[in-house]
Amino acid sequence: MRQKKYILPESEIPTAWYNIQAIMPNKPLPILNPKSRAVLKPEDLYPIFCEECAKQELDQTNEWIPIPEAVREQYAAYRSTPLVRAYELEEALGTPAHIYFKNEGISPSGSHKLNSAIAQAYYAKQQGITNITTETGAGQWGGSLSYAAKKFGIECAVYMVKTSFNQKPYRRSIMQTFGAAITPSPSMSTRAGKDILTVNPNDPGSLGCAISEAVELALTTPNCKYAVGSVMNHVCLHQTVIGLEAEKQMAMAGEYPDIVIACFGGGSNFCGTAFPFMRHTILEGKKTRFIAAEPTSCPKLTRGKFEYDYGDEAGLTPLLPMFTLGHNFKPASIHAGGLRYHGAGVILSQLMKDGYMEAQDFPQTETFKAGILFARTEGIIPAPESCHAIACAINEAKKCKESGEAKTILFNLSGHGFVDMGSYDKYLSGEMFDYKLTDEELQQYIASADALNK
Amino acid sequence: MRQKKYILPESEIPTAWYNIQAIMPNKPLPILNPKSRAVLKPEDLYPIFCEECAKQELDQTNEWIPIPEAVREQYAAYRSTPLVRAYELEEALGTPAHIYFKNEGISPSGSHKLNSAIAQAYYAKQQGITNITTETGAGQWGGSLSYAAKKFGIECAVYMVKTSFNQKPYRRSIMQTFGAAITPSPSMSTRAGKDILTVNPNDPGSLGCAISEAVELALTTPNCKYAVGSVMNHVCLHQTVIGLEAEKQMAMAGEYPDIVIACFGGGSNFCGTAFPFMRHTILEGKKTRFIAAEPTSCPKLTRGKFEYDYGDEAGLTPLLPMFTLGHNFKPASIHAGGLRYHGAGVILSQLMKDGYMEAQDFPQTETFKAGILFARTEGIIPAPESCHAIACAINEAKKCKESGEAKTILFNLSGHGFVDMGSYDKYLSGEMFDYKLTDEELQQYIASADALNK
C-alpha cells in the first residue's frame, strides 16, 4: 500500500525556531517610531508586547531560537501535523506533479495560528502578565489565543471585527468555549472605537480598527499585553515549526520541493512554511520557487507598494517597511477573512523585493472551486484562506501536465473549513462574487501610506 | 518530555475487522421477517443492503473479516487516529486515574462514522451499484456517506431529519460540498413521507421516519442500495478498527484499560471501541468494565426493554431482538442528535443481557459541562454525542480520586464539535434544558414494541 501520510514522533518536534533574519543578504529596513522616526529598540516595544517577543522581533543575529520545553509540550497535543501526499488530487488533475500538503487544520483551534499563540501566551505567563488581548477577523487567531491563554492560566479579551462577529457566530462560540471574553469592534470600550462609532454608529469594523482597540486596551490596562497573529517577525518565527517539520517529513518521503506555496494574509503562514526551505536557497543556492497566494481583492504583494506604513488603521503601531495597500485600505467582503489585511510582514517584504519569492492572486470563486475539488479528492474541507494555496497548487500542477514535468509541489493547508460552511453554501448556490480593485481605488488607498513617506 | 499521543504507522492499520459474534457465549437471537416471522437469511436482506454487508450481518462464524485493500487505502487518509493521554484533564480533576482517549474526530467527516461508510460504499461499488441512499440525524453519518460515495464514484442521496436540516445548515453544506443530494424528511418523495405529511404538514421529522424514506427509495430505485450508519451488526463490525488500533496503541503506552467508555446512540461507536477489548474478557477472563454512556432523555439501555422491534418508524425493516424504547418513541430535542434513536444493536443487546457491559445515563447539561472542561484542558471541542463519553470518564476518574485507585480509563472521542457550536452557545448562555422521560411516557412508547411480541 502506498504511503499517504508522514508523521514525526513527538521527540522530533523541532527544538528551535528558524530566524531567517540572521542570514538575509539584505537585512530588513528598521522599524521606526511613528512620531520621532527613531529606529525602534526592543524596549520601545515593551509597553505593547511581552519582552521576549519584542527581543525576537528585532533579533537579526541568532539563526536558531530555542523553543521552550513548555511550548513544545503544548505543541505535542497536535504536532507533528501530518504531511500528506495528495495522490487523489493528482489523479483528478492527471498531473505528473507530486503534490504534498502539510495539514495544520488538525490543531485544537483548527489552524496554524496556534503555533504562535502558545508561544506568546507562554512568554506572557513567564513575565507575570495576567491579561492578554488581541483582535480577530475570521476568528482563527482569536480562537487560538483564547485556547493558548487558557492553557497558561491567563485571561484573554478579543476584539472581533463586527461583521465577522455577526456572520461567524460559531467562531465566537469557539472562543467563548475556550473561556475568552469577546467584544465586537468597533466598540465603545476604547477611544479608537468611540471615535469611529461617533462618526458612523453602524461601522462594520475592520481588522485595522480591531487592532487599534486591542493595542489601546493593552496600553491602558495594568499587567496586560497585546498578542499579534501575523505580520510581525516574532509571529513568523514561531510559525517556522511548520516548515521545519515539513522539511523532515519531505525527507521521509524522499523528496525536496521544487515549489512551496502558502496563502497570504499578513505572512505568518507563508513565512512559517517557506523560510526553513528558503534558507537552503539563500545558503546553498537550492532552486525552489516560493509562491504567496493572495486574493485578487486584496493584492498587497502583486499590486501594493513597498514603503513605510502603519500596521493598524488608527496609527498606533510603529512604522513598518513593507508592501502595503495603505493603512486606510477597505477590503472587499471576501469570505477569506484572514487575508483581508493591508500589509505584509517586514522580513518577507524585503525577501520579495530581493527576488527570493513571488506572488500570485486568485479571485475567490476560483479558490472555492479548488477547495471543493480538494474536499472531494482529499477529504478535507479547507478554510477559505487555505483555498488560495490549493488554487495555486492546482495551477502549478496543471502547468506540469502541459510540460510533462514531475515537479514536487508542497503547500500548507493552514486550516480546515468546518466553521466556514456558510461560505461554501454561497458558492454552491451561485451567490458568490469576485471583487477587483480598480487602479483608482488602489492609488487612493496607497496615498494614506505615501503621506508617511514624504 | 512526557509522551502525549500514540500513532501507528500506516502499515499497522488493521488488516481485518473483529467479529465478536463468532465467540459470543450466547449468540444473538435471530433477526426475523416482520410478516412471516421466518428467520432471516442473508439473501432476504439483498433488496436493501449490498450482498457483502448482508453476509457480514449474519456471520456468526468467522472471527476475523479481512478489510479490503481499497478500504485500507481510504482509511490511510486519516488512520490510525491518535490515542491521546489526557494529562491535563487528569490534572484538572486531580485524579490518580490514567485517562486515554481515541480521537476519531480527525476523520475527513469529523467522526468515526466514516469507518463504515467507506466499507459500505466500497462493497456497493464492487457489486455494480450506482446509487446509494441513507438517512441522517445530526449529519455525521450523512456527511460520512456523502464523502465515501464520492471516493468510489457512486451518487449519494441523503434524507435529513427536517429539524436538523433547518437547525444544522453547516452539516447540510458539508454533505453538499462532498457532492450529495439532500432532502429534508419527511418529504413528498416517498409513500412513507407522504403518509406523514398528509396527517401533519409541519411534522418535524425523526430518524425513524428518515430511515423509512431511505429504505423505500432503495427498494423502489433500480441499482440503488441503502446504507446504514449504526445499530446493524456489519456497521459495528466495521467500527472495530477503532478498538483494534486502540489495543495496539495502549500497548505502546504500556497499559491495558480497566474501563472502556463510549457514548451510545445505536451502538456503532460503542461496539467499535469495546468489542476488540471485550474479546479478551470473553476468551481470557480479563477484568474490564465496559460502559455505554447514553442521554437521560433517550435511555434505551438503562430503562428500555429487551424484545423484538422495528428499526424504523414505519415498520419497513426486519424485526430486531434488542433493547428498545419502542419504534414510535419520540425523542426530546437534545443537542446530541446522534443519540436520539429508540433501539440498540442486536449483538450488544445480547451482551448487555449477559452482563458483559453496563450503561449509565447523563443529562445533557452535565455532558456539555464535561465537554467544556475537556475543551479547555485537552484542546478539542467535542461533538455533543462525545460529551456523554467524557462525562462518564470524568465520573469514573472522580471515583478514582475518592478511592485513590490509579485506574486506566479509555474512552472514544467519536467526533469533534466544530459544527455544533450553536449547541455550546445555548449551554454558555444558560438556555439549555434537561429532559427526563416519565414512566408513563416510557410505557406508552414501549407498548408499540410490546404489540409485536405477543
Image (cartoon, coloured by chain):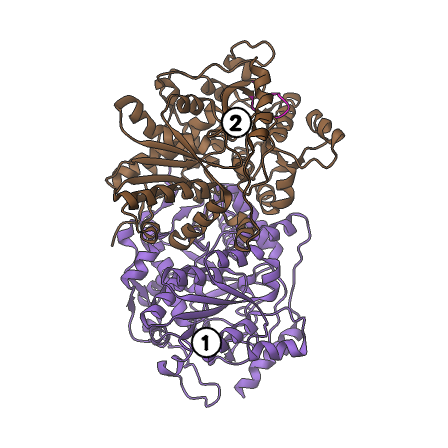
Chain colours: A brown, B purple
Q: Is residue B337 above or below residue A297?
A: below
Q: Which residue is mark 2?
A: A343
Q: Which residue is mark 1?
A: B218
Say left or right for A181 vs B371.
Answer: right
A319 or B26: nearer the viewer: A319
Residue B111 screen position, x and y as percent: 45, 56
Would you say B303 lies left or right of B122 here? right
- Vertical order, A174 against B391 (above or below): above
In-front residue for pair A12/A432: A432
Looking at the rendering, the stretch of residues picked out in magenta corresponds to A310-318
Task: Give the residue displayed 42% in from the left and 78% down from the top.
Answer: B222
Is residue A321 visible to the viewer in this orientation of the structure?
Answer: yes
Disc 1 marks a residue whose amino acid type is Ala
Rendered view: B191 above or below B401:
below
Say what secondary structure mark 2 lies in.
Answer: loop
Horizontal and vertical percent position of residue A222: 64, 22
- A251 and B326: which one is in front? A251
Label 1 crowd bin: few (<14), some (14–19), many (20+), radius 10 Å: many
Q: Residues within 10 Å of mark 2 (few under 14, many from 20)?
A: many
Q: Chain of mark 2?
A: A
Q: Residue at x 37, y 31 (%)?
A: A274
Q: Main secondary structure of the magenta part?
A: loop
